[in-house]
Image (cartoon, rainbow, N blue to C red):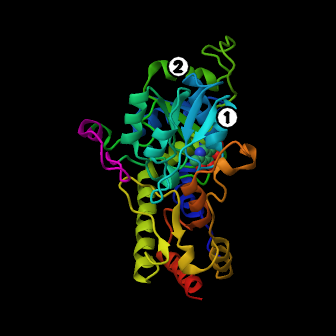
């Protein structure tokens, strides 16, 4: 069976260094806020090109703490994508604000700036774009909207560590001012808004060996609050100034991440290469574009997922049938996400579903991908898909 993700080849590559780094932490017993945490924060900030980076307990906490540091809470609205993992909307609800869902673009599956603009009200305080599957959102337009309406931006980068913004929005090339385009080109996802939030959940592009996250900003005042919030609201130990969280990145996880960080670009390139191979094979077999919409190898995309959109009218099959038939042929696949956030039971009757996101959620299928995936495995996946489509 081909799994959707195999972490073992990348761990094998760095196993000796990981073992050494973990033994070092165990020997010095500094398990909470140890030296490795500070060093990882410095190294991650340098890699991302941001001034401040703080390790936290998870990507969810990074979002919650980011929103809190911007003063977002009761009575505020935050516009986000319905097509994401629930932690995105949950973070907004859990600080007391209201998630407002703007629809997505049917090609990139990312939030559509035109839809964002329509959802702005007098209560809107922030936009939370999600760089889904590792593809950067249309940040030029999103930043333009934020500047025009005096809104904050919290970037959900849980799936996009290392993704780079190309400087123009592939979905909405029109209307990007040249000056904004050139200043944003080459920025890492998470460093364009006021706050960027990353997850180090093991399956993420940069994953640790448990839960972990990072929250970043360029703003000194926001940084001060982020740092306090993750440490029970205390700048100085036992001098708590606000209600915060117990949300620290474990020293052991930071040690793992320090070993992995120098490899991230190579691994992300491996994912891009694997995506290019899938695109080529699917086209060669005549599956795309006729039966399948394949993801564009957009500049800076780091392919956390390789997600196709099935043209169900051409296939006369349901997506879950395709999934089941792939499984019978030894290929695992996943659906991210079968229910958009605005249609989840927790928000029952609060929202009118966003139509594009609703449709896409019934058609997407994520195929196996990891940085060191072997070509013969990708061929097996495509063989199985061809077989299902033609049976
Ligand atoms: C888009 C998105 N946002 C937020 C999160 C939350 O991250 P974590 O699981 O580290 O809390 C995830 C992780 O699954 C995610 O995919």
Please identify the residue farthest to the bottom as the structure is shown: 391
Query: Which residues are drawn in magenta?
Result: 166-182
Q: Earlier in the sequence, mark 1 or mark 2?
A: 1
Residue pointed to by mark 1: 93
> Which residue does the image show at 51% across and 79% down from the upper left?
382
Question: Main structural element of the magenta stretch: helix, strand or loop?
Answer: loop
> Which residue does the image show at 67% across and 71% down from the upper left?
320
Q: Nearer the viewer, residue 206 or 219?
A: 219
Asked which secondary structure carries label 1, the reply is helix
Q: Nearer the viewer, residue 97 or 272?
A: 97
Q: Position of residue 359 (x, y in %)?
A: 58, 61
For residue 204, above or below residue 36: below
Q: Which mark is residue 224?
A: 2
> Which residue does the image show at 69% across and 13% down from the upper left?
238
Quarter occupied by residue 323: bottom right
Asked which secondary structure carries label 2, the reply is helix
């Amino acid at each position: 069976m081909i799994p959707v993700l195999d972490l073992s080849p990348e761990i094998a590559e760095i196993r000796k260094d990981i073992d050494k780094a973990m033994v070092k932490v165990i020997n010095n017993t500094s398990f909470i806020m140890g030296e490795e945490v500070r060093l990882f924060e410095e190294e991650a900030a340098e890699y991302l090109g941001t001034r401040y980076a703080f390790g936290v307990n998870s990507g969810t906490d990074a979002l919650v703490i980011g929103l809190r540091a911007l003063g977002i809470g009761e009575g505020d609205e935050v516009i986000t994508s319905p097509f994401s993992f629930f932690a995105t909307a949950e973070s907004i609800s859990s600080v007391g604000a209201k998630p407002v869902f703007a629809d997505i673009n049917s090609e990139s599956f990312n939030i559509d700036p035109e839809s964002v603009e329509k959802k702005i009200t007098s209560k809107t305080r922030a936009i939370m774009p999600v760089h889904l599957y590792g593809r950067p959102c249309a940040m030029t337009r999103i930043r333009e909207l934020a500047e025009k309406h005096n809104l904050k931006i919290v970037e959900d980068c849980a799936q996009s560590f290392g993704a780079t913004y190309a400087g123009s929005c592939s979905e909405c090339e029109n209307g990007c001012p040249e000056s904004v385009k050139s200043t944003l080109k080459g920025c890492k996802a998470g460093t364009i808004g006021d706050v960027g939030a990353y997850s180090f959940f093991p399956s993420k592009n940069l994953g640790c060996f448990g839960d972990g996250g990072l929250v970043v900003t360029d703003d000194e005042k926001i940084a001060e609050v982020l740092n306090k919030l993750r440490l029970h609201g205390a700048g100085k130990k036992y001098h708590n100034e606000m209600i915060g969280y117990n949300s620290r990145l474990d020293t052991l996880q930071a040690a793992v991440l320090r070993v992995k960080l120098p490899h991230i670009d190579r691994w992300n390139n491996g994912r891009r290469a694997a995506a290019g191979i899938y695109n080529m094979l699917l086209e060669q077999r005549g599956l795309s574009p006729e039966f399948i919409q394949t993801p564009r190898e957009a500049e800076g995309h780091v392919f956390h997922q390789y997600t196709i959109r099935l043209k169900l009218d051409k296939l006369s099959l349901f997506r879950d049938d395709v999934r089941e038939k792939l499984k019978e042929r030894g290929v695992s696949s996943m659906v991210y996400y079968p229910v958009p956030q605005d249609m989840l039971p927790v928000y029952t009757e609060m929202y009118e579903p966003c139509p594009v996101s609703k449709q896409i959620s019934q058609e997407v299928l994520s195929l196996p991908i990891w940085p060191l995936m072997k070509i013969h495995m990708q061929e097996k996946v495509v063989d199985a898909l061809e077989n299902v489509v033609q049976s």
